[in-house]
Image (spheres, grey):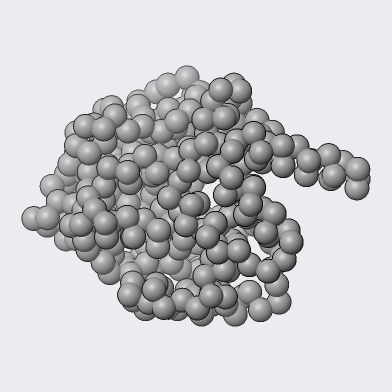
């Protein structure tokens, strides 16, 4: 079983050695590392070449600057492994990550393997501060219906948005012509949506495989009702304890999860309306429709928490109408401008 690890590279010579060496020192030997230089202007491209000369399993591709989506697509075209694994150049894998993937797959060769990850921050002296861990859970299914339920659970737990900490079966990608859209942001979200529509077999492992370095990516804060943090803690413990606990969430916990998801969805829709992804009008409408019709969106809108604002937001999203969503986004922007 061979793994193709794909790393988009753009002006990251400071963090790139740590990323590359996390693959070089894997305990599992059957891999190839494809470094896709996205038109770097620092020393990143030269650094990629230096590592490639050290180990024949490393290959370097150069492209004009086009973004992470096209870089990953070019990496997938060059891949020869049974599974494709993604890594960002400012992050790194645990040294046994590929071995965990291989042991999880064994003779079953599932369409998708999902692992846990941790959010970290590096100090000036290079030490690692662990901010939190998402250990996922142990689960396996060969059923399309169960895979669909897992999609809901994993997406709500934040395990499906990013492409890293996963092993994608390459044949499944090729057969279904799945690729990353050419968006400036959130292209990985829609890659996973498209991939999961074709998934039948899934293995999830609670092993923490990936280190996501927050460094200058920034922290986002959000205001919640006073008891929401305690609810979040209770919900997380239930889901991490057992997949079967998913059906045992009380109404308030279910409302909390839906509130978090739909509020985040509205932020994406608003960003799309403001054209922060440099799309034309037709592409923006198609993207909005895809977000509105996603299975998790439909399920989340069934629960409406108290509060007129939340009810309005859910009514807007539940409408499935791109025109109504855009009108709502426009109205909120006008109100913000009036308020100053």
Residue at the image position 38 percent from the left and 68 percent from the top: 135
Left or right of 134 in this view: 292: right
The answer to whether residue 54 is above or below residue 122 is above
Left or right of 68 in this view: 323: right
Residue 44 makes an appearance in the image: no
Quarter where residue 148 is shown:
bottom left
Quarter where residue 95 is shown:
bottom left
Left or right of 188 in this view: 26: left
Residue at the image position 61 percent from the left and 41 percent from the top: 269
Residue at the image position 28 percent from the left and 69 percent from the top: 138
The answer to whether residue 319 is above or below residue 225 is above
Judged from this view, the residue extending furthest toward the left is 107
x then y, percent, for residue 142:
18, 57
x then y, percent, for residue 284:
58, 29
Left or right of 306 in this view: 335: right
Quarter where residue 165 is shown:
bottom left
x then y, percent, for residue 153:
40, 62
What is the count of numbered marks?
Answer: 0
Residue at the image position 55 percent from the left and 42 percent from the top: 320
Residue 130 makes an appearance in the image: yes
Q: Quadrant of the C terminus?
A: top right
The answer to whether residue 159 is above or below residue 15 is below
x then y, percent, for residue 292:
53, 43
């Amino acid at each position: 079983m061979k793994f193709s690890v794909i790393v988009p590279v753009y002006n990251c010579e400071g963090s790139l050695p740590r990323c590359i060496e996390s693959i070089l020192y894997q305990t599992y030997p059957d891999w190839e590392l494809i470094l896709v230089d996205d038109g770097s202007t620092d020393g990143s491209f030269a650094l990629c070449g230096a590592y490639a000369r050290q180990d024949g399993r490393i290959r370097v591709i150069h492209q004009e600057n086009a973004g992470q989506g096209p870089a990953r697509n070019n990496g997938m075209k060059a891949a020869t492994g049974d599974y494709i694994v993604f890594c960002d150049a400012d992050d790194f894998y645990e040294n046994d990550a590929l071995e965990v993937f291989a042991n999880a797959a064994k003779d079953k060769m599932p369409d998708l393997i999902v692992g846990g990850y941790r959010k970290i921050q590096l100090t000036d002296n290079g030490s690692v501060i662990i901010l939190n861990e998402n250990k996922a859970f142990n689960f396996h299914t060969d059923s399309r219906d169960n895979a669909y339920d897992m999609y809901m659970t994993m997406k709500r737990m934040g395990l499906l948005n990013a492409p890293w900490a996963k092993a994608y079966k390459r044949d499944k990608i090729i057969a279904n012509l799945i690729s990353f859209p050419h968006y400036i942001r959130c292209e990985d979200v829609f890659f996973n949506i498209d991939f999961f529509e074709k998934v039948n077999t899934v293995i999830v492992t609670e092993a923490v495989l990936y280190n996501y370095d927050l460094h200058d990516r920034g922290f986002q804060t959000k205001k919640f009702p006073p008891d929401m943090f305690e609810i979040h803690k209770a919900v997380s413990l239930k889901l991490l304890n057992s997949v079967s606990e998913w059906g045992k969430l009380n109404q308030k916990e279910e409302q909390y999860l839906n509130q978090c998801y739909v509020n985040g969805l509205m932020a994406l829709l608003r960003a799309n309306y403001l054209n922060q992804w440099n799309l034309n009008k037709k592409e923006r409408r198609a993207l909005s429709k895809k977000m509105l019709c996603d299975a998790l969106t439909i399920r989340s809108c069934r629960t409406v928490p108290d509060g007129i604002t939340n009810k309005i937001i859910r009514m807007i999203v539940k409408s499935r109408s791109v025109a109504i969503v855009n009108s709502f986004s426009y109205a909120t922007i006008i109100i913000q401008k009036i308020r100053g």
